[in-house]
Structures are given as structure tokens and as C-alpha cells.
Image: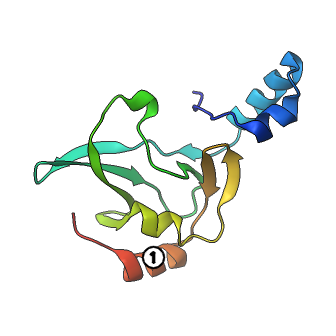
Amino acid sequence: MYNPISIGINEINKFHHDLNRFEEYLHSTQSLDVYYAVPKVYKVHDRLVGIYAIGANIPSVIPKEPYIILNQIQGIHEWYVMVQEGKTIPYNDFINNVSNANYYDANHVIITLNKTQIDDLVAKYEVKI
């Protein structure tokens, strides 16, 4: 299965408008052994919330800013990341407090957190939704 990718100037510079290089870029990006986090949307207290889920020691691709692909669902009021079963933190607190985000594409990063890092985030930022 292939993941969506976002192509920006860095990606264009990698293949310089050459279709063979573009094919190589797509293959190398799509063949990474990563979990592509897709948000689930729930209605909570008459408001839509989006939740990404990640796990410990799993390289996870998440967006720099949360979104729904192709804007299929509109009106999401709040975004969260579930980092442990039943443990959620606000998206901005998550993305602004992980130190090991690696570039994936123009709009996404790869984050791998161990259990200690997740426990620290939960202790500081957990919210009940």
C-alpha cells in the first residue's frame, strides 16, 4: 500500500523535473518501513475532533499541521494524538515537544518515540476528551 506524499520545492529539487528521478524518489519514499498515521474523526460533545494514533518504537509519519486528506471532512474543532491506549495530548503540544522529528516530505515528519518519551509527554500534556 502506498502513502500519500506532499511534493514541495525540496522534492522537486531531488528529481529536477526528470521523470526517471521522480520515479526513484517515489519508490524510495514509498518503500520506507514506516507507519503512516491517518486521523480518525469523532463527534465529542457535539464537536468534531481529529485523533492521530502512534505507538512506542514505531517510526510514524505525521503531518506538521493536522489535516484530512482532500478535505473530505470539514469543521474539525480540535486535534489530538493518542500516544498510549486512552492517553491523548493536544496535537500542538505533541508536535511542538518532540525533539526527534525527521523530514519525510513537504508536509510530514517521521517521529519515533520510546516508552519513556511517551510517558513524559503524557505526564506533561495529557487531556481527557
Residue named by callout 1 = 121
Q: Is residue 33 left or right of residue 71?
A: right
Q: Please name the amino acid that badge 1 sits on.
A: Leu
For this orientation, the residue located farthest to the left is: 45
For this orientation, the residue located farthest to the top is: 19
Q: Position of residue 41 (x, y in %)?
A: 28, 43
Residue appearing at x 38%, y 82% in the figure = 123
Q: Position of residue 48 (x, y in %)?
A: 22, 46
Residue 66 to residue 5: above or below: below
Q: Is residue 48 left or right of residue 72?
A: left
The secondary element bearing badge 1 is classed as: helix
Labels in figure, total: 1
Residue appearing at x 33%, y 43% in the figure = 40
Q: Quadrant of the N terminus?
A: top right
Q: Position of residue 71 (x, y in %)?
A: 39, 31
* Quadrant of the image occupied by residue 126: bottom left
Residue 63 to residue 70: above or below: below
Residue appearing at x 85%, y 22% in the figure = 17
Q: Is residue 125 visible?
A: yes
Q: Position of residue 117 (x, y in %)?
A: 53, 76
* Quadrant of the image occupied by residue 85: bottom left
Count residues near mark 1 (Cα–Cα under 10 Å), then give few for <14, some for 14-19, many for 20+.
Answer: some
Residue appearing at x 21%, y 63% in the figure = 129
Q: 65 or 84: which is nearer to us? A: 65
Q: Is residue 31 visible?
A: no
Q: Is residue 26 left or right of residue 17?
A: left
Its colouring scheme is rainbow
